[in-house]
Image: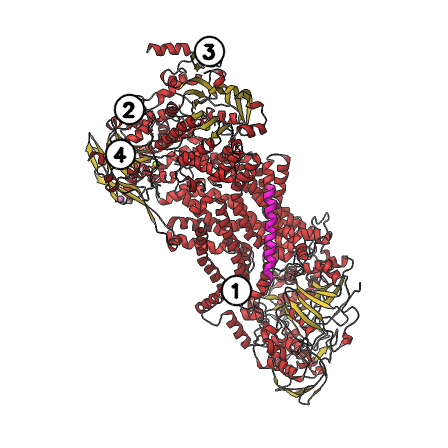
């Protein structure tokens, strides 16, 4: 990972939601970077702050959220220092595009697909010179490329006339039509059938190659991570606990949480055997313990874990782990 | 029917939950206070009224408000303030009576339509649509013309006129609730139809009915007032705000208080019912998080 | 011995055209949700049923519990055809088999507390209530059985997490002490760690209570982990069925293998990126012949015309002309 | 869409037949001997006989029902009991006034309601929002006849700004508009308040939806998102209310017409009911019902237009 | 509106109480809505002298009555033209106008010419009415009232009756112009009696239907309407306004509290006597009629033939309370205890208030009265069946005593007393055949005395009407029957 090929660098980013029941620290001092043309996975259980990360990058957080600190360097420009207008003009839907979590509801139900695509294109710098007809042609082309049959006639239809998989294709078309340098894909295949999921994943892979796009791929499904990503960050309760090339995550998981997750996957162990689980529940974000967030559920926890928050530290080349007990654990693994 | 101690405490807990949500809503206090005043004044009218509302004295007719007659006197020299207070009773009767009738009829017909389906469903839907085909006030007027104006008739007519709202809501909700998994779940544990209807479906239909009826209490008061204002409503010697509005109308220029007082009562009561029902709507929505109970999320041990 | 047996089950839904539709010349449409499914579940084993969304898995489950009326076929429970059971009989049968719903939260009445939900079966079946010493204790026991704390008793469904709601559904099913538990996607939408906990719970319960499972899922990892026997459905029909290990080791039907290969991590050896093209056709007009042929790489002429029968190949049944 | 509209139309047939049956049976349900009430003590037996024939009381009821429905299908609503004027003339004479009143009140309510709803949702939780919310709550809770009375008292009698009577000089548009101001505003306020509340909450709800996040993430200008994407979606529940309001306002017009002494269907009906003018009651109620049903149908269809999903259900 | 008025300040705007139903005279429905306009458009052979019930020549300049009272010869005014191009008025028009009423028994005013055999056209300007029997009401009501108005035979035949009713053609001072919501008339420049017009007589008259009394009053106040009858209660508001004139006239219907004589315990004359004292018209007039009406202690009003000048008034003060208690005791209700009476009333303000006052008056004597307010239909039904002990009733009148007294004959459909007397019946028969005014007077008084003796009612009043006149109106002439006479000195202020 050479510095000059870095397209996105997130540095010490913290975000809090202020709600009636107190403040929830959804992101706690997270740091990672994305290289050009890289597919970077972000994995974690529900509520760990994955979507918040993506929304923070585009600064489309809800009002209740507040960015507490950090930098988001995109192509060397700190997005957090830009004003709303600039971000809107130059980044959203231009340099960066995003596919949000819920395909069923990601498109506005009362406008045709064409209307929505064209509005996105009108906003995009690449299409300023085109007239409506040309834009329509381009949109149809894009839809066809994303595997929508008879795109010409279907472009005039409303979202509810598409199946879930096709909606996701439309979303991808919308994302790629912007020619982005970075795509934020927030669980694009959750709630789809495995066969459809496979189709979408393949489509994504192909398009990334074709459009030279970097991808931040968010999912809670480790097996998908394994399929598509080059590198992966594991999130737990607002922290990144481990970053590593994807293969290493599976072959030599560093953090106890990562290990737990991988062992949990049914089918990987023997049939009918009791699956290993991670005891307890994700800590409540409103009152986090002072030390390691995972301490409660960790079998290897020690005093130090209870007092201090571990920071990401390089464990191996390109492999970072936030755990005080890493050394001990890795030696244990090697022993086995 | 006996309520077990456990059932009682459970009920108490549920109500406590609703109340705790409502407690955090200003509308509860505002609407509740207005409704409280409404009911309180109506029920205690004989104690609160300074004069006999029926006592006439033509020599003191049409007096302006004074210390003795807080809202002046009407054309027969009766104390308007006392009459307004007694009129609360009419409004209570009309609003609660009318809504009660339409709710009972609506629930019965609505569930029947959803339950039996087919011809009966279509016939009942047609009935609802026929009633709904008339602008309400015009249907009310024509029905009053048929049966003649009296409190009892008006209550019944108002009830019939808005009944289709409940019938349709209950029908639609019953149909959609019927499809819910938890109703199927009740079937799989062996519950029979009446049980499903009364234990699973109706309780889930009821909240919409409750909220609607809160709004309709306001409409009832409005329609009665309008009807009486046109002279088709409550008949003397009983009096209602609408009737007082009508009486005062002729004196609007020299004695505007004669209409302002009843107009105020009508508007405030309607305001009370509509705000309160909005707050109930919020509380009964199970998705609204109760500020008290959202504390800890203890779970699997 | 087979606890339950389904023989050539057909369930068709009619999409009723309303009176007005009919006047406008629209006739009712048939949805072939389940079209000739046969399966046997030996007592105390788990039968896994997989397939894409809309292929009729839930419908099989629902007909087993007599929640839908099958067009044709037999459902034999302990040697007795229960399709024509009368009301009394149905009520009793329902105690013997229970359903765990696909959507955990919506299967719980939003206006009832967990406690009330668990009490309902005892109110419906007075003899059940008589058989327990104290209702209160019994409910505590049920909560314990599914690893829920006592405090959960007074909560409303929406106040539970998905995993917890699922447990209440399981506890309700167990309160009737059934023999057969039909689990309709019991791990859908759960995070991995919670998913594992639920699976563990189910396996434990099966052993403790001698339960028989019909396990519906489209998560192949889970099915692979838990099921003894496996059935693969496509568009209302059984494509392949047999011993779970056997099929997972070597799927014969093109659909089965496509399904497995689409599912990341199930067939870890094959690293080539395989994608099954197209979407499931509408069950209103299923394709003629083999219903899978439009998406099948190996489709032959015969597949377009003739519906393949299930035939025994290598210790399992496959419906495919490739093996004729 | 066409099919949906057609379906709604077909269902109208039995509904309207039901309405006709009700109107028809009013003849039998009204208390008292119609001849006595209508003709008074001077009636000769011949006049009574003629009256009964006119009301269809001379035939067994099934026959007169058929005759009644037949006449109506031919556009013949009968003649006013006091002879001489066909009911449809009476109605046509006043109907334009009612329609004008209802539509202009509707127009005002929609403009005010949607406008205020949007403003207060755009400035959520600011003072402006609070002021609008409170004002609009008051509007919605005061019945329109009270507004009308207050308007007459204040603007017409005290200040003399507005006329109190009539619909304005026929043919003089300016004068007619001048006469419309008071009634239209009084009629619209209640509904405007209602619409504003619905638009506000619907708007706020829509802004929470996932697709708004999508639109934001693609950098569409906030004004486009707010006024195009969110509004069209948010307006949907308001549309139902708006068109429903057309019916409500039609009902409310009864009071307004009486109080402002404006010619109109409501006024005609109230007078007819007072005078037991049965054919006029029946004809007037029928026309009111027709308009009402039409308004409701319009509501359903415009609802379908704004929510494309409905058409296919 | 102001603009319109400024544009044309010789337009007189009058509010009618309701929509006009017809402008064909014998089909008149209500005097206030239809009659007012008909009298502007049509003339009769004779007419009431302005402000009185005295007869003066109209289209007939003179007439002769035969000795047997069965032949009346009219000498018609020459050169009178109908409106539009309908030519000169002749005896043919008289024949046509009257015979169509006499021959068709479905015409509402058929009774007005019940005994008319034929109208003989002697020449263009002479017409003779041949009667089967003498008709007492001929000169009191038939001829000067609406039935006697002359229509253009040519116009009716050309247009057809129904159409004519909406496009009337007469000889009167104003011509029919248009009828949308409003009815518009314009001055007939060829009117035969040019003297009727005075300076300020309006060029145009516009009748606007306004059913709400308050709206009428307000409209006068804002000068949108020039003349309107308003409610009694609005008198004070109007008087307080500058520029608005208020005029009060007597109503034309007799109000009474009806005693249903055959209904237990009202069949006891002592009870009826007690009630007649207890129910005091003074309070009712003060409360229900805003103190504006005159007390009338008998059936017929002072302007009418048959007025009983010395009719006794029954007031408690005259006889003392003890007398009443005694009457009640004789009726079986010592101290009034246990006496519960039912009372019907209608929905109008006056009726409602009257009933409430009576209820209150009875309560002073421990008599409990329940009020039932009914719609017109139900009210008439219950009155005809005598279902209530008491009733608040009113009948409208004409100047004809025969008409006004007919209802109380035995067994009459409209005899609300549920009472009968042969003597009364015979007197009425005689009255209806009497033409001489003095004789009529004598018989009618005799009849009222019978009613008085039998104690059937507390007579109350003829009611009152409050008229608001805008600042534009200088003077208004109104008939005793409350018909406004437009050209005759009802004049507008000059600007
Ligand atoms: N609008 C909001 N207001 C308050 N808290 C919020 C809001 N959105 C998210 N949160 C909280 O922030 C935390 C992180 O949420 P986020 O949506 O980023 O999680 P996620 O990892 O995307 O989860 P999932 O897999 O369920 O999508 C959660 O605890 C969530 O409850
Ligand atoms: N009650 C019903 N009425 C009409 N059609 C139905 C009904 N229930 C199911 N279907 C249809 O039958 C087919 C099979 O449905 P089923 O629910 O059994 O599928 P499934 O395999 O459980 O899918 P999923 O994985 O999405 O739950 C689907 O096409 C569905 O639309
Ligand atoms: Mg997320
Ligand atoms: Mg399913
Ligand atoms: Ni079949």
Q: Nearer the viewer, mark 2 or mark 4?
A: 4
* Element at label 4: loop
- Asked if labels 1 and 2 share a chain, the reply is no
Label 2 to label 4, Cα distance in Å?
Answer: 34 Å
The residue labelled by disc 4 is C298
Q: Give the CA distance from mark 2 to mark 3.
A: 37 Å
Of C105 and E323, the residue lying toward us:
C105
Query: Residues under labels 1 and 2: Cα distance?
Result: 80 Å
Q: Marks 1 and 3, Cα distance to the nearest angstrom?
A: 91 Å
Q: Which residue is mark 2?
A: A272
- On residue D30, the disc is 1
Left or right, C305 with reference to E409: left
Q: Position of residue C161 (x, y in %)?
A: 42, 29
What's the CA distance linking mark 4 and mark 3? Answer: 61 Å
Chain under label 2?
A
Category of crowding for the residue at label 3, using alpha-carbon neighbours closer than 10 angstroms: few (below 14), some (14–19), many (at least 20): some
Quarter-wise, where is residue C289 in the image? top left
Question: Is label 1 on the same chain as label 3?
Answer: no
Image mark 1: chain: D
């Amino acid at each position: 990972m050479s510095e000059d090929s870095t397209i996105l660098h997130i540095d010490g980013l913290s975000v809090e939601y202020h709600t009636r029941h107190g403040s929830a620290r959804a992101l706690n001092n997270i740091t990672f970077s994305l290289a050009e043309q890289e597919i970077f996975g972000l994995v974690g259980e529900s509520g760990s702050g994955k979507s918040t990360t993506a929304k923070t990058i585009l600064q489309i957080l809800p009002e209740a959220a507040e960015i507490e600190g950090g930098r988001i360097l995109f192509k060397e420009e700190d997005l957090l220092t830009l004003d709303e207008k600039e971000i809107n003009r130059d980044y959203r839907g231009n340099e960066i595009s995003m596919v949000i979590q819920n395909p069923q509801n990601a498109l506005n139900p009362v406008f045709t697909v064409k209307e929505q695509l064209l509005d996105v294109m009108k906003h995009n710098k690449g299409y300023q010179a085109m007239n409506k007809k040309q834009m329509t042609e381009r949109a149809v082309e894009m839809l066809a490329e994303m595997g929508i049959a008879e795109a010409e006639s279907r472009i005039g239809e409303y979202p509810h006339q598409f199946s879930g998989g096709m909606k996701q294709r439309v979303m991808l078309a919308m994302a790629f039509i912007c020619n982005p340098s970075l795509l934020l894909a927030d669980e694009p295949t959750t709630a789809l059938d495995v066969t459809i999921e496979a189709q979408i994943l393949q489509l994504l892979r192909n398009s990334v190659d074709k459009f030279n796009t970097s991808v931040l791929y968010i999912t809670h499904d480790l097996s998908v991570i394994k399929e598509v990503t080059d590198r992966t960050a594991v999130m737990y309760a607002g922290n990144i606990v481990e970053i590593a090339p994807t293969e290493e995550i599976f072959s030599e998981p560093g953090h106890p949480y990562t290990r737990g997750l991988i062992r949990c996957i049914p089918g990987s162990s023997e049939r009918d055997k009791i699956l290993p689980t991670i005891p307890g529940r994700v800590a409540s974000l409103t009152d986090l313990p002072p030390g390691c967030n995972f301490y409660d559920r960790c079998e290897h926890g020690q005093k130090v874990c209870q007092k201090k928050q571990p920071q990401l530290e390089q464990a191996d080349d390109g492999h970072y782990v936030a755990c005080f007990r890493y050394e001990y654990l890795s030696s244990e693994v090697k022993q086995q | 029917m006996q309520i077990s101690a456990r059932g009682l405490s459970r009920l108490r807990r549920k109500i406590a939950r609703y109340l705790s949500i409502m407690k955090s809503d200003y509308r509860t206090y505002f609407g509740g206070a207005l409704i409280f005043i409404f009911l309180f004044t109506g029920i205690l009218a004989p104690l609160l009224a300074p004069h006999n509302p029926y006592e006439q004295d033509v020599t003191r007719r049409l007096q302006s408000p004074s210390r003795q007659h807080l809202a002046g006197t009407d054309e027969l020299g009766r104390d308007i303030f006392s009459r307004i207070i007694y009129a609360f009773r009419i409004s209570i009767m009309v609003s609660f009576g009318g809504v009660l009738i339409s709710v009972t009829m609506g629930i019965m017909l609505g569930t029947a339509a959803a339950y039996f389906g087919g011809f009966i469903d279509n016939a009942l839907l047609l009935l609802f649509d026929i009633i709904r085909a008339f602008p309400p006030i015009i249907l009310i007027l024509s029905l009053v013309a048929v049966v003649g104006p009296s409190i009892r008739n008006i209550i019944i007519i108002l009830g019939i006129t808005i009944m289709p709202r409940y019938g349709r809501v209950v029908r639609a909700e019953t149909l959609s609730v019927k499809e819910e998994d938890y109703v199927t779940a009740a079937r799989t544990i062996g519950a029979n139809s009446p049980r499903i209807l009364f234990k699973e479906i109706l309780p889930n239909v009821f909240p919409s009915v409750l909220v609607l009826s809160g709004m309709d209490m306001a409409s009832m008061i409005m329609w009665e007032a309008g009807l009486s204002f046109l002279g088709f409503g409550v008949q003397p010697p009983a009096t209602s705000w609408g009737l007082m509005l009508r009486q005062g109308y002729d004196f609007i220029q020299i004695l505007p208080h004669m209409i302002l007082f009843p107009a105020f009562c009508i508007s405030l009561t309607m305001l009370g019912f509509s705000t309160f029902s909005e707050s109930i709507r919020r509380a009964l929505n199970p998705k609204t998080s109760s500020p008290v109970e959202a504390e800890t999320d203890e779970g699997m041990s | 011995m087979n606890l339950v047996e389904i023989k050539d089950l057909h369930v068709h839904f009619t999409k009723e055209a309303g009176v007005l539709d009919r006047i406008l010349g629209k006739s009712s449409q048939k949805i072939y949700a389940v079209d000739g499914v046969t399966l046997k579940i030996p007592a105390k084993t788990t039968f896994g049923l997989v397939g894409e969304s809309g292929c009729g898995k839930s419908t099989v489950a629902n007909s087993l519990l007599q929640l839908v009326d099958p067009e044709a076929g037999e459902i034999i429970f302990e040697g007795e055809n229960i399709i024509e059971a009368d009301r009394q009989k149905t009520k009793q049968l329902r105690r013997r088999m229970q359903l765990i719903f696909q959507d955990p939260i919506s299967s719980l009445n939003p206006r009832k507390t967990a406690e009330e939900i668990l009490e309902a079966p005892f109110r419906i079946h007075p003899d059940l209530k008589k058989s327990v010493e104290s209702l209160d204790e019994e409910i505590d026991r049920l909560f314990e059985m599914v690893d829920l704390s006592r405090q959960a008793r007074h909560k409303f469904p929406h106040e539970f997490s998905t995993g917890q709601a699922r447990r209440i559904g399981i506890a309700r099913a167990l309160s009737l002490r059934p023999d057969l538990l039909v689990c309709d996607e019991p791990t859908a939408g759960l995070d991995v760690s919670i998913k594992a906990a639920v699976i563990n719970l189910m396996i434990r319960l099966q052993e403790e209570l001698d339960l028989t499972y019909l396990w519906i899922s489209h998560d192949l990892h889970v099915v692979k982990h838990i099921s003894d026997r496996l059935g693969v459905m496509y568009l209302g029909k059984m494509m392949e069925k047999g011993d779970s290990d056997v099929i997972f080791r070597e799927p014969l039907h093109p659909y089965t293998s496509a399904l497995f290969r689409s599912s990341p991590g199930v067939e870890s050896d094959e690293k080539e990126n395989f994608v099954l093209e197209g979407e499931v056709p509408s069950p209103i007009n299923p394709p003629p012949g083999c219903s899978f042929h439009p998406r099948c790489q190996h489709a032959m002429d015969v597949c377009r015309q003739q519906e393949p029968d299930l035939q025994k190949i290598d210790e399992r049944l496959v419906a495919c002309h490739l093996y004729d | 869409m066409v099919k949906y509209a057609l379906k709604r139309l077909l269902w109208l047939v039995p509904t309207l037949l039901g309405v006709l049956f009700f109107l028809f049976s009013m003849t039998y349900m009204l208390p008292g001997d119609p001849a006595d009430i209508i003709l008074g003590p001077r009636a000769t037996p011949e006049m009574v006989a003629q009256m009964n024939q006119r009301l269809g009381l001379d035939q067994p009821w099934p026959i007169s029902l058929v005759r009644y429905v037949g006449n109506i299908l031919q556009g013949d609503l009968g003649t006013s009991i006091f002879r001489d004027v066909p009911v449809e003339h009476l109605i046509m004479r006043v109907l334009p006034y009612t329609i004008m009143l209802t539509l202009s009140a509707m127009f005002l309510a929609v403009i005010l309601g949607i406008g205020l709803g949007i403003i207060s949702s755009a400035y959520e939780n600011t003072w402006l929002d609070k002021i609008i919310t409170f004002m609009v709550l008051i509007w919605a809770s005061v019945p329109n006849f009270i507004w009308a009375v207050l308007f007459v008292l204040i603007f017409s009698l005290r200040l003399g700004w507005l006329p109190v009577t009539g619909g304005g000089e026929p043919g003089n548009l300016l004068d007619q508009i001048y006469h419309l101001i008071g009634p239209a505003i009084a009629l619209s306020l209640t509904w405007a308040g209602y619409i504003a509340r619905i638009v506000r909450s619907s708007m706020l709800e829509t802004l929470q939806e996932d697709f708004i996040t999508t639109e934001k993430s693609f950098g569409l200008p906030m004004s486009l998102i707010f006024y195009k994407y969110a509004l069209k979606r948010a307006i949907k529940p308001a549309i139902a209310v708006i068109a429903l309001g057309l019916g409500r306002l039609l009902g409310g017009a009864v009071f307004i017409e009486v109080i402002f002494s404006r010619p109109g269907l409501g006024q005609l009906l109230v007078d007819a009911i007072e005078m037991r003018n049965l054919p006029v009651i029946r004809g007037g109620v029928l026309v009111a019902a027709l308009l009402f049903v039409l308004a409701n149908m319009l509501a359903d269809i415009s609802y379908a237009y704004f929510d494309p999903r409905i058409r296919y259900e | 509106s102001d603009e319109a008025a400024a544009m044309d300040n010789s337009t007189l705007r009058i509010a009618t109480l309701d929509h006009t139903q017809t402008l064909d005279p014998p089909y008149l429905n209500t005097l206030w809505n239809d009659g007012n306009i008909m009298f502007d458009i049509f003339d009769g052979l004779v007419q009431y002298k302005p402000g009185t019930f005295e007869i003066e020549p109209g289209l007939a300049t003179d007439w002769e009555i035969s000795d047997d009272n069965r032949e009346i010869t009219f000498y018609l005014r020459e050169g009178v033209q109908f409106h539009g191009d309908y030519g000169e008025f002749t005896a043919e028009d008289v024949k046509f106008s009257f015979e169509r009423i006499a021959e068709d028994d479905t015409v509402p005013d058929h009774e007005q010419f019940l005994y008319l055999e034929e109208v003989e056209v002697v020449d263009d300007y002479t017409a003779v009415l041949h009667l089967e029997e003498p008709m007492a009401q001929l000169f009191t009501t038939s001829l000067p009232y609406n039935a006697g108005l002359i229509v253009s035979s040519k116009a009716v035949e050309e247009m057809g009756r129904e159409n004519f009713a909406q496009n009337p053609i007469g000889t009167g001072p104003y011509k029919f112009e248009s009828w949308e919501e409003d009815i518009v008339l314009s001055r007939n420049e060829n009117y035969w009696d040019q003297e009727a017009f005075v300076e300020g007589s309006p060029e145009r008259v516009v009748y606007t239907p306004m059913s709400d009394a308050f709206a009428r009053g307000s409209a006068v106040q804002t000068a949108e309407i020039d003349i309107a009858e308003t409610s009694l209660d609005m008198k004070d508001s109007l008087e307080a306004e500058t520029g608005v004139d208020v005029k009060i006239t007597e109503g034309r219907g007799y109000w009474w509290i009806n005693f249903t004589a055959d209904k237990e315990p009202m069949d006891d004359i002592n009870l009826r006597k007690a009630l007649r004292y207890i129910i005091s018209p003074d309070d009712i007039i003060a409360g229900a009629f805003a103190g504006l009406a005159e007390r009338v202690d008998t059936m017929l009003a002072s302007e009418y033939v048959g007025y009983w000048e010395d009719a006794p008034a029954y007031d408690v003060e005259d006889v003392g309370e003890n007398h009443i208690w005694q009457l009640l005791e004789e009726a079986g209700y010592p101290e009034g205890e246990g006496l519960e009476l039912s009372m019907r009333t209608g929905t109008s303000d006056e009726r409602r208030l009257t009933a409430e006052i009576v209820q209150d008056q009875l309560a002073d004597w421990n008599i409990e009265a329940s009020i039932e307010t009914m719609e017109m239909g139900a009210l008439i039904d219950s009155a005809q069946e005598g279902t209530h002990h008491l009733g608040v009733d009113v009948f409208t009148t004409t100047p004809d005593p025969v008409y006004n007294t007919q209802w109380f004959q035995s067994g009459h459909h409209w005899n609300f007393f549920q009472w009968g007397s042969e003597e009364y019946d015979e007197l009425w028969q005689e009255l209806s055949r009497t033409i001489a005014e003095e004789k009529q007077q004598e018989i009618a008084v005799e009849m009222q005395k019978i009613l008085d003796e039998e104690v059937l009612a507390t007579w109350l009043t003829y009611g009152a009407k409050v008229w608001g006149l805008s600042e534009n109106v200088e003077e208004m002439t109104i008939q005793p029957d409350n018909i406004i006479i437009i050209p005759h000195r009802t004049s507008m202020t000059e600007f």
